[in-house]
Image (cartoon, rainbow, N blue to C red):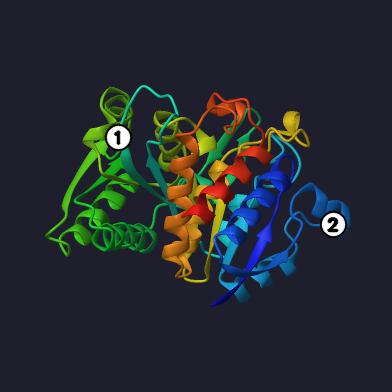
Amino acid sequence: MSHRITLLPGDGIGPEVTGAVVSIIECSGVDVEWEKFFVGAEAISRYGDPLPQDVLDSILRNKVALKGPVTTPIGTGFASINVRLRKTLDLYANLRPVRSLPNVKTRYEDIDLIVIRENTEDLYSGLEHEVVPGVVESIKIITEKASTRIARFAFDYARQHRRKRVTAVHKANIMKLSDGLFLQCFRNIAAQYPEITADDRIVDNLCMQLVMNPNQFDMLLLENLYGDIVSDLAAGLVGGLGVVAGANIGLNGAVFEAVHGSAPDIAGQNRANPLALLQSAVLMLHHIGEPEAAGRIYDGIVTVLEQGPEVRTRDLGGTGTTSTFTAALCKAIQRG
């Protein structure tokens, strides 16, 4: 089967890690035709828009995209490409699996956690204005529609992947209307999945519980802002943003991405770790109906991480490069 996939290499280390992942997918035997586009600062210089319409049209046509990291200016400049993609394409579900990996030193072992984040509303709606000089108001939007569909996504995922428990995360003790609505929608949907345990935690207590004993949780369901924060916290439990996958999924398509930054300080030095984008590509292969190739790549990741430090990049405690990691992984895949 041949697949046509939109490819957004990004900037900074993006082209390096994207190139590595494309090579590894080719080693797995999956037939992919890549439609490559520029986004971010490079797209502004070429087309006057950090997210050209041609990019959106390609994703809508192909229904799937693989995206490297893109620098987002802080305080000034263009709006986040990630946020625009999610809102424009209505990619309402953010999926972040968090799993322990061999030879990635952390404080915890055997973590297998799924974080699901509502992607389209909450404070990320961007509804801000200055009331009077020195006073700014930002409006939090929570709707029954969005809260219900993300809860259904979470429970459908749990049923499909045989997960046993979904925990809703909120601050309904203080925001009784907004977070209260999110929690009530969660409970309404949970009642339709009696085989799956459903409970909830206040967000500050959840953060404490995660750092004390993350293994007590199975799946977490969160509003947009809480999910942004907690998904990064959870990544830190297994080695950081450089080792975890990320996906944004909706009815119009899915974008699989590296969730870390563009690291311009090491760009072009063959030092970048492609593992986060590669883990996202594994999710993507499952999504497009290539589970065998996805399994071979994941098994290859485990094999390579169990090898000596000469193939692992520096952030993983090794002395290797992007190239050595990629070559070792292709070799492991081809050996089977």
Q: How many marks?
A: 2
| Contact, mark 2 vs mark 1 (Cβ under 8 Å) | no
Q: Amino acid at mark 2?
A: Gly
- Above or below, 191 relative to 17: below
Question: In the rendered image, which residue does mark 2 sit on?
Answer: 48
Q: Amino acid at mark 1?
A: Asp
Assign a secondary structure to mark 1.
Answer: loop
Percent position of residue 317, x then y = 54, 23
Q: CA distance from mark 2 to mark 1?
A: 47 Å
Percent position of residue 13, x then y = 71, 40
Residue lying farthest to the left in this orientation: 194
Residue lying farthest to the front in this orientation: 335
Q: Relative to the observer, which residue lies in front, 256 or 227?
A: 256
Assign a secondary structure to mark 2.
Answer: loop
- The label on residue 110 is 1
Percent position of residue 232, x then y = 46, 35
Sort mark 2 into few (<14), some (14-19) or many (20+) by Cα contacts within 10 Å.
few
* Residue 160 shows in this picture: yes
Percent position of residue 110, x then y = 30, 34
Q: Relative to the observer, which residue lies in front, 21 or 142?
A: 21
Q: Relative to the observer, which residue lies in front, 320 or 84?
A: 320
- Above or below, 230 relative to 254: above
Q: Residue at x 58, y 50 (%)?
A: 330
- The label on residue 184 is none
The tag earlier along the polypeptide, 2 or 1, is 2
Q: Relative to the observer, which residue lies in front, 208 or 31?
A: 31
- Above or below, 198 relative to 175: below
* Residue 127 shows in this picture: no
Q: Quadrant of residue 161?
A: bottom left
Q: Residue at x 51, y 48 (%)?
A: 332
Q: Residue at x 58, y 43 (%)?
A: 328
In this rendering, would 115 be left or right of 35? left
